[in-house]
């Protein structure tokens, strides 16, 4: 510490560490919420994924979101997408009748 530094004012690196910690916390919370909403996994598999997400705070959520993204791309029959496709087909069918 130099003579002009104030020990009560946090240094820049302390702000960065706090911001990184908050980001890791948000990423982990988002992964846990996403995992809880996942309907296709068995309860035992959800528990193992939860252990991975909580056990590895950065790598666990990253792997979960990568897995989730890949599984949704490989299984295009997402129920929310099906509802949107049906609604679009109905609108298009009504448009063609006019």
Image: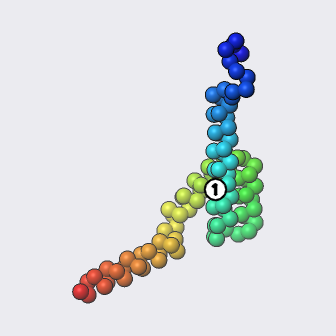
Q: Residue at x 73, y 26 (%)?
A: 8
State the colouring used for the structure image: rainbow
Which of these two is toward me, 81 or 75? 81
Point out residue 64 in the picture as x, y percentages from the top left corner.
63, 55
Q: Residue at x 64, y 67 (%)?
A: 37
Q: Residue at x 24, y 86 (%)?
A: 98
Q: Residue at x 47, y 71 (%)?
A: 81
Q: Residue 6, relative to residue 80: is it above or below?
A: above
Which of these two is toward me, 92 or 47? 92
In this picture, residue 84 sits left or right of residue 5: left
Q: Mark 1 Cα within 10 Å, few/some/many (few <14, many 20+)?
A: some
Which quadrant of the structure image shows residue 93?
A: bottom left
Q: Residue 93, relative to residue 7: is it above or below?
A: below
Point out residue 54 in the picture as x, y percentages from the top left corner.
74, 51
Rendered-image quadrant of the N terminus? top right
Which residue sits furthest top? 3
> In what element is the residue under mark 1?
helix
Q: Residue 30, relative to residue 4: is it above or below?
A: below
Point out residue 70 in the picture as x, y percentages from the top left corner.
54, 58
Which quadrant of the structure image shows residue 38?
A: bottom right
Which residue sits furthest left? 98
**Which residue, given by chain and number where applicable, does mark 1 sit on?**
30
Which quadrant of the structure image shows residue 13?
A: top right
Number of marks in the image?
1
């Amino acid at each position: 510490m130099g003579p002009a530094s104030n020990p009560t004012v946090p240094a820049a690196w302390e702000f960065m560490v706090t911001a990184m910690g908050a980001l890791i916390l948000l990423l982990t919370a988002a992964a846990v919420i996403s995992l809880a909403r996942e309907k296709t996994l068995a309860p035992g598999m959800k528990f193992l994924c939860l252990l991975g997400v909580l056990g590895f705070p950065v790598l666990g959520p990253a792997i979960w979101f990568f897995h989730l993204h890949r599984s949704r791309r490989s299984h295009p029959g997402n129920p929310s997408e099906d509802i949107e496709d049906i609604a679009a087909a109905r609108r298009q069918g009504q448009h063609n009748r006019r």
